[in-house]
């Protein structure tokens, strides 16, 4: 039986809504499909992975994906799902963001396929060349104001006190034109996106019907939320980015590892290419042995390897073990700082270590003991660790040789009571 991408997406809970006929279209022929991505930042974040993975799934089933960087539409700003108008970015920033994002798309899409290679385009290439009078005459006449006002992205903003600028109001026309352009030049017949894009996508479908007399299609994915109602893609330190300079592989790994039991099976369906049988086995483990967190570990491993590679995954796993007594001797200064950024810390002049500093004094300085007597008892009881190695000698000294990357000492009392000593000078 021929594999069916629509049924695959449906099983994974990926289809929120679609134009009637999409299922038959995908089963009948290999179609060109595009998904647009704003370039408001120089990196995509985990919220973008749903449409990216969906494009990749479509490609694996033989369809022809186009990832469209919104270099032109970002100059206007999409009002969909936004409470207020975004600040407009300088043109040079938008161009730089588009170039940076193109590189990240290669983590998901195959640009070297001989059968159906993925393509990256930038709508600035055609939108910035438009003549305003011709555009309003040829494109704008196909949309009534009543039609545009009925769209959720417009109506919800008009209900707010600050309203909607004319600039944002035109966004729907520009995105519709993108669909028309890609239909005319590349035979694109399917546009996908998040459910907040439904109004813009169906407007493009209508434009092509009016101007070309042809039927094209749209399909949207659900906007991912956590089971507790909070926004997906946010951590305590902010958005979770795909750029390792913004979100380290360790933090990226931890984001997925910390997924709630109620969410993890859905995330395995949405974000990974794991087969149905393996996901069902992991789902059973969540119910039968939740303490083992096998599903979360599998999710974290798959996503980190996909975005950052196997080497970064190994480093992230080593870093994760550091908080549970694992080896930290091979970690970089940046990794140590990242791992222990949320634990108490203190600063110490390097000069105090050069002659050897009694560990009992260091424990008091670090706040892990109230007095030298308490520090000595903790050492004698075997509850103190220096760089995750047990320190049982009450007379032990801490010296320059103990420094990690020449600037850190990690102290631990018991299993989880850490302090990071930052050595200056």
Image (tube, grey):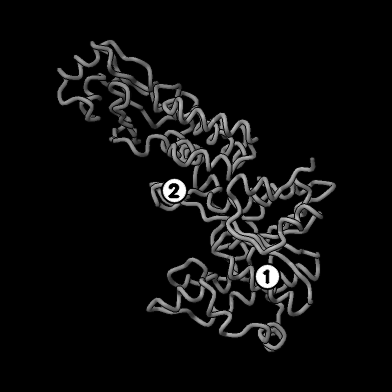
- Which of discs 2 and 1 lies nearer the camera? The answer is 2
Left or right for 163, reference 183: left
Q: Which residue is mark 1?
A: 124
Ranked by sequence position, the earlier of labels 2 and 1 is 1
Above or below residue 18? Residue 276 is above
Residue visible at 73% across and 46% down in the picture = 4
- Residue 226, label in figure: 2
- Can residue 193 be seen here? no
Residue 147 pos. (x, y %): 58, 80
Crowd band around label 2 with a 10 angstrom C-alpha radius: few (<14), some (14–19), many (20+): some
Residue 379 pos. (x, y %): 25, 14
Helix, strand or loop status at disc 1: helix
Q: Quadrant of the C terminus?
A: top left
Residue visible at 75% across and 54% down in the picture = 26
Q: Quadrant of the N terminus?
A: top right
Crowd band around label 1 with a 10 angstrom C-alpha radius: few (<14), some (14–19), many (20+): many
């Amino acid at each position: 039986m021929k594999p069916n991408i629509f049924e695959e997406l449906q099983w994974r809970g990926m289809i929120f809504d679609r134009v009637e006929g999409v299922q038959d279209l995908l089963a009948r022929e290999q179609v060109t499909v595009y998904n647009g991505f704003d370039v408001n930042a120089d990196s995509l974040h985990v919220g973008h992975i749903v449409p990216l993975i969906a494009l990749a799934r479509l490609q694996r089933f033989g369809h022809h994906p186009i990832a469209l960087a919104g270099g032109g539409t970002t100059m206007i700003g999409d009002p969909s799902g936004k409470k207020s108008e975004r600040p407009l970015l300088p043109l040079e920033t938008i161009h730089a963001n588009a170039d940076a994002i193109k590189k990240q798309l290669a983590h998901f899409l195959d640009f070297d396929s001989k059968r159906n290679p993925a393509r990256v385009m930038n709508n600035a290439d055609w939108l910035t060349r438009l003549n305003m009078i011709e555009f309003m005459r040829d494109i704008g006449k196909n949309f009534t104001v009543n039609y545009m006002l009925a769209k959720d992205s417009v109506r919800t903003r008009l209900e707010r006190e600050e309203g909607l600028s004319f600039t944002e109001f035109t966004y729907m026309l520009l995105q519709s034109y993108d669909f028309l352009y890609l239909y005319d030049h590349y035979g694109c017949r399917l546009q996908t996106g998040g459910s907040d894009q439904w109004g813009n996508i169906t407007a493009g479908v209508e434009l092509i019907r009016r101007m070309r007399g042809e039927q094209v299609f749209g399909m949207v994915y659900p906007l991912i939320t956590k089971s507790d109602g909070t926004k997906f893609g946010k951590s305590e330190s902010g958005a979770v980015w795909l750029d390792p300079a913004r979100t380290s592989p360790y933090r990226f790994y931890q984001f997925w590892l910390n997924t709630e039991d109620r969410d993890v099976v859905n995330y395995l369906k949405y974000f990974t290419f794991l087969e149905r049988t393996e996901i069902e086995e992991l789902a059973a483990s969540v119910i039968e042995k939740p303490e083992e967190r096998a599903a979360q570990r599998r999710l974290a491993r798959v996503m980190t390897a996909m975005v950052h590679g196997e080497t970064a995954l190994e480093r992230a796993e080593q870093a994760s073990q550091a908080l549970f007594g694992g080896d930290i001797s091979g970690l970089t200064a940046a990794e140590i700082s990242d791992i222990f950024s949320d634990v108490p810390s203190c600063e110490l002049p390097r000069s105090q270590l050069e002659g050897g500093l009694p560990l009992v004094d260091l424990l008091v300085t670090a706040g892990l003991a109230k007095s030298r007597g308490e520090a000595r008892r903790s050492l004698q009881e075997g509850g103190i660790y220096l760089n995750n190695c047990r320190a049982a000698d009450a007379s032990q000294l801490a010296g320059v040789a103990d420094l990690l990357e020449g600037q850190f000492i990690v102290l631990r009392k018991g299993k989880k009571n850490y302090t990071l000593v930052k050595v200056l000078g």
